[in-house]
Image (cartoon, helix red, strand yellow):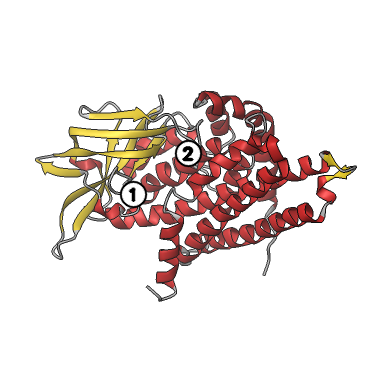
Amino acid sequence: MDYTLSTEQEILRESVRSFAENEIKPVAQELDEKEEFSYETMQKMAELGLFGIFVSEQYGGQGMDYISYIIAVEEIARVDGSHAATVAAENSLGVGPLYYFGNEEQKKKYLPKLCKGETLWGFGLTEPNAGSDASNAQTTAVLDGNEWVINGSKIFITNGAAKITAGSTVLCRTGTRDDGRPELSCIIVETGTPGYTAKEMHGKMMWRASNTSELYFEDCRVPKDNLLGPRGDGFHQMMQTLDGGRLSIGAMGLGGAQGCLDMALKYSNEREQFGRPIAKFQVNAFKLADMAMEIECARLLLYKACWLRDNDMRFSKEAAMAKLYCSETMYRCANHAVQLHGGYGLMKEYDVERFYRDQKLLDIGEGTSEVQRIVIARHIGVL
């Protein structure tokens, strides 16, 4: 087995790491405090080629593999979760469904601007009463002549209400199947469509510098041709999208955990108590050793899942495992890092405080840790 990254992947890692350290790190704390989405750093990330990484050059993308995409998210998350969320959600949830399920006209219309970072795109899945039970979506779309009439709402949608958001892919109930289950379809809704309102959400504990929104639909009419893929294929599209999205959440957990270890190592080697650096005390050295070990395990698991995906092999089980393990690895690493910082770890002056807050979303977003365990249990035949 060859675990060596390609020269191109190593170059990508170094370039994204350098960018994150020099462009994002200096402003991350202030943006978090102000709860402000930065269009300036977002545009710089676009210029670096971080949007549409896995999209073919035909549509304006970079044409890279999924491991390269995951490496980019990992390196951004190593410095700041909010910026990593913007990249991860835009690629996996925004660009992904349009690229994999859109027709040629839809791809040519939306993807080039999305890949250039000129526009952003949301993925309208979660509802106030349909989180883990996403298939129970209550937002409806009724076909009236040549138009879909949409009514309902979505919540916690990343990149859904930024100034440059061009629209969202919305999961809707379009009918009832023969077996009585809801027929779900994905429909494209552009910003500015009458009856469609996107509202920014504030007061977040985590990812405070990312754009999170609520979407409202009141007799919102869109063309019949805005259907994404075949009618009734929405559940399949949603599940496939979430499989890829879980890998990017895993990358955020991996990168965040690495960032916590980096900060913990630096601080514990500088902080002295009882005449020596606190890293030299066995109780602390073991914390650091455990962090390093878990991060290595998380990276191997995540990269394997991406390798399966890149080689057109089944990866749903591994994606759930990677998302779960990487998320919980960051939780343990953030907890150790704050403990090693002592009282300073509780102060906003230190980045580790932000990492501790940002981690929690990873246990919840794109399938909670509980749901991941259900997915894994089903794959191994016990549920």
Q: Residue at x 57, y 33 (%)?
A: 45
Q: Residue at x 46, y 66 (%)?
A: 317
**Which of the labelled discs sits on residue 54, or is there none?**
none
- Provide the residue designation for mark 1: 131
Which quarter of the picture shows residue 263?
A: top right
Amino acid found under the numbered disc labelled 2: Gly
Which quarter of the picture shows residue 13?
A: top right
State the residue in front, 382 or 72: 382
Element type at marker 2? loop
* Residue 18 appears in the rendering: no
Q: Residue at x 67, y 48 (%)?
A: 258
Please state, as top left, top right, bottom left or bottom right, where the C terminus lies in the image: bottom left
Question: At which x and y percent is residue 58?
Answer: 46, 43
Q: Residue at x 44, y 32 (%)?
A: 211
In the figure, is residue 364 to the left or right of 328?
left
**Which of the labelled discs sits on residue 60, or is there none?**
2
State the residue in front, 272 or 381: 272
Amino acid found under the numbered disc labelled 1: Gly
**Label 1, label 2: how far apart the Cα atoms are:** 33 Å
Q: Are marks 1 and 2 in contact (CB under 8 Å)?
A: no
Q: In this rendering, which labeled residue sits more in front, label 1 or label 2? A: 1
State the residue in front, 17 or 213: 213
Element type at marker 1? loop
Q: Is residue 275 above or below residue 331?
A: above
Q: Earlier in the sequence, mark 1 or mark 2?
A: 2
Q: Is residue 49 above or below residue 178?
A: above
